[in-house]
Image (spheres, rainbow, N blue to C red):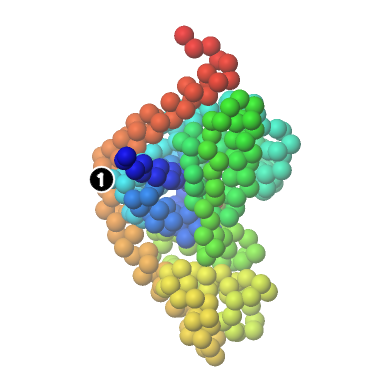
Amino acid sequence: MSEQLPRKKRILSGIQPTGTFTLGNYVGAVRNWGALQTEEHECLYMIADLHALTVRQEPAKLRRNTREAAAMLLAAGIDPARSLLFVQSHVPAHTQLSWALSCCTQFGELSRMTQYKDKSAKHPDNVNAGLFTYPVLMAADILIYNADLVPVGIDQKQHLELARNIAQRFNGLYSPTFTMPEPYILKAGAKIMSLQEPDKKMSKSDTNANSFVLMTDDADTILRKFKRAVTDSDGVVRASEDKPGVTNLMTIYSVFTGKDFEAIEKEFDGQGYGAFKEAVAQSVIDGLAPIQGEYKRILEDKDYVDGVLKQGAEQASRLADRMVAKVYKKIGLLQL
Ligand code: ATP
Ligand code: LTN
């Protein structure tokens, strides 16, 4: 008898093209996307342009950001030979499924989402319906491919729990249809904090440019931003809850050098923050340099980037269309 090969685990994740990616996006999400491209996984990575519309976008800028996001993902190690890379709006089945799922999602559930609360507080003049239903579209992105694992930063955990609740509800109401997705959140770097307000997440939409490091920042800018990073007054390099600024810098240094906290504490024992900040900056400069080189090269080849996205969308659409047809049939929509 022939032995059956275990099914490959399916990985799905997305990132919004709301601007140049930050170090937080890379450490919390994108770096793991690349690492998951192994024989045991089937990877789908998506640029969530529809999600980006929940805050006001300038059309030409959104178009440019979307292509730049694709180039950055390719530069950061997403390999089109091993992963599907596509733009969310190029696969219309996501929005088709989203409508069906929104009818299985309660108003109260969506009201509890912290990202919705944060973003509506931040943009009080534009609390649009899309901002509110955003997590349903995200659930559709995931469930449409029967994804097993979703690599994200910790801020997305609540949205993933909602996706699981929607899947379970749908499966119970009709019949087993969706796989239960699991979040894939690495402990180290799941939440990189703002360099200026270390109790807040580093975010690409922060108005203070000193609060984040962009993937495209040059060496001088990176050094300057780390030198200005907010720490504390006790001058000891030690990880602790009451030292969020220093702990954040240690996390970044640890990710880029592979050293653990104990080794880092020893390395900077008695040295103060000056030398420490310079070393953190240098590790980031060295870590980003090859990605930045690739990014420049890839971005110049627009045809290559567009070709990858086109192929990704075609292949993703084949999978997604099949799932939508299945779901529409199950819920009683007439098929001719
Ligand atoms: P925006 O500022 O526009 O809200 P963002 O910088 O929060 O955007 P997203 O596109 O919402 O970025 O997130 C993309 C991925 O990056 C998600 O998996 C998210 O969890 C992760 N991520 C974002 N910021 C951080 C951070 N500071 N630390 C770790 N992971 C992060
Ligand atoms: N909401 C995510 C982006 C996103 C996503 C997804 C992540 C959209 N669809 C599906 C994982 C799976 C965010 O980062 N803000």
Query: In the image, is residue 275 above or below residue 36?
Result: below
For disc 1, the marked residue is 301
Q: Nearer the viewer, residue 318 or 288?
A: 318
Q: Nearer the viewer, residue 238 or 119?
A: 238
Query: In the image, is residue 24 above or below residue 91?
Result: below
- Badge 1, how many Cα within 10 Å: few under 14, some, many 20+? few
Q: Nearer the viewer, residue 310 or 202?
A: 310
Residue furthest top in the image:
336
Q: Is residue 98 left or right of residue 120?
A: left
Q: Is mark 1 within 8 Å of ligand 1?
A: no
Query: In the image, is residue 174 above or below residue 283?
Result: above
Q: Position of residue 80 (x, y in %)?
A: 31, 45
Total numbered labels: 1
In percent of the image, x 26 and y 53: which residue is there?
A: 297
Residue 64 appearing in the image? no
In percent of the image, x 71 and y 43: which residue is there?
A: 112
Residue 163 appearing in the image? yes
In percent of the image, x 46 and y 36: which residue is there?
A: 145
- The N terminus: image quadrant: top left
Amino acid residing under circle 1:
Asp
Q: Secondary structure at mark 1?
A: loop
Q: Position of residue 94 (x, y in %)?
A: 49, 31
Residue furthest bottom in the image:
270
Residue 70, picture quadrant: top left
Q: Nearer the viewer, residue 37 or 285?
A: 37
Residue furthest right in the image:
108
Q: Is residue 5 left or right of residue 267?
A: left
Q: Position of residue 332 (x, y in %)?
A: 58, 16
